[in-house]
Image (cartoon, rainbow, N blue to C red):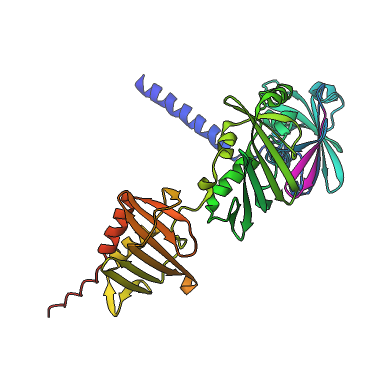
Amino acid sequence: MKFRGLLAAVVVLLALGGVLYWSNHRKPANPTNSATPPILKVQTAAVTGLTLKPNGGQTIVLAKSGPHTWQIQAPGQYPASATAVTGMISTLGEMRSERVIEEKPTDLSRYGLSQPSFQLDFTENHQTREVSFGDNSPTGGGVYVTVAGDPRVYMTPSWVRGDLNKSLDALRDKRVMPVPAATVVRFDLIRNGQTIEFARVGNGWQIQKPQTYRTDTFQVDDLLDQVTGAQWDPGIDPAQAEQAFAHAKPYASVKLMGSTGEQTLEVRQDHDDYYAKSSAAPGTWKVQVALGEALGRTVDSFRNKQLFDFAYAEPNKLEVHSGTTALFLNRAGSDWWSVGTKMDSDSIEDLVSALRSLAATKFVDSGFTAPDIRVTVTSGGGKQVETVEIQKTKDGGIARRADGPTLYAIDADTMSMLEGAISGVKPAKAATPVKK
């Protein structure tokens, strides 16, 4: 009995193995249906227009208005979200079928395609093509699709229709000031009767009003990004926002000058809420608190508090005078020398790090009479020479650069680190002779 059971088990295993081998090595009966043929071949970069036609819904017309910009032309004139439109075109260009449902259908109503649930027209190389979406498949995971000029009915994943059938709110550029930040060459921040004027100089920014100051480019870029990236709240009705704006107190305004000409932004405050309107986008909108906070900053927050500009460039020379200490240091390759003596590289790097970190906690109007420390840094192959003088105080120090009258207050910890780095500079250890 045991032998018969074992024999039966062996027969079953052999049969299953044969079926598995056959299924893995046989050719498909219908190779056309096993593939995932593309429904469309689209040159996405050549698409210049889109028209969305949801059945029973609002027709939306979009047109390319620049290399990276789109405009909604119907049902109204609005800037479009380039990210949203680019995503749609990408989905369109990658749309593939799960399978061909019918090669030459005689009754499109079977698939909900006689009256499509959604139709998308797109213009590519000045030619308009139509894609129609019908009913969902019985399982709900796919949707039936046809393309004008192609008789076949395809099935594609239902998320494709969701990606393409976007609402007006989803397609609108929600930025209150939709201006490319990189094209802005000058902008003004006006608040409490004071104008702060920023002008682009080379790769950075320069404060020109209320007077010329050394400028923290990172902080100015951050403000500009806040202004050009601020979005309106789609959950607040525009009519309600307009009414709130009318009763709110004027808070700040901005003027931008760039490739789009002069654009203005006006922001008003009502308790903890901010409302805005601009010349670059229609409507009046509630905006994020972050925009209000950014516009509330003072001119000092945009001033450069670093004492030295050499940043992460390697200095070529250092000259330091502090009390009775006088250091004359020159870099040669990776080594530092002082009057023919090779210096300890780690101690010099500590000094360079302390000079890089030398920054003000605030700006002051007085308190500097005579320097206790004087440092000159030469960098950029000798092209940049910076001198800073520091007078010690009971709270730290007051510093000034040789190229301007601005006074920088330095805290006690920063002063202690600098003085420690100066006193720590030392010659390199002599090499230990090798014993023979």
Q: Is residue 205 above or below residue 247?
A: below
Toward which corner of the image does residue 28 lie, by quadrant?
Answer: top right
What residue span does the magenta drawing correspond to?
A: 59-72
Q: Nearer the viewer, residue 179 or 133?
A: 179
Q: Nearer the viewer, residue 405 or 150?
A: 405
Q: Quadrant of the C terminus?
A: bottom left
**Residue found at the far top of this picture:** 1
Q: Is residue 176 visible?
A: no
Question: Is residue 216 toward the left or the right of residue 184 in the image?
Answer: left
Q: Is residue 408 above or below residue 28?
A: below
Q: Nearer the viewer, residue 79 or 250?
A: 250
Q: Position of residue 431 (x, y in %)?
A: 20, 75
Which SS does the magenta portion mostly show?
strand
Question: Is residue 368 toward the left or the right of residue 239 in the image?
Answer: left
Q: Position of residue 173 (x, y in %)?
A: 71, 36
Q: Quadrant of the N terminus?
A: top left
Q: Position of residue 137 (x, y in %)?
A: 71, 23
Q: Position of residue 141 (x, y in %)?
A: 66, 25
Toward which corner of the image does residue 400 lie, by quadrant?
Answer: bottom left
Q: Is residue 132 above or below residue 42?
A: above
Q: Nearer the viewer, residue 100 or 314?
A: 314
Identify which residue is drawn at 76% across, 34% down: 282
Q: Report how many numbered discs are placed on residues in the image.
A: 0
Q: Is residue 6 visible?
A: yes
Question: Is residue 348 toward the left or the right of residue 431 in the image?
Answer: right
Residue 298 is a magenta residue: no
Residue 62 is a magenta residue: yes
**Residue found at the far left of this picture:** 436
Identify which residue is drawn at 31% across, 71% down: 327
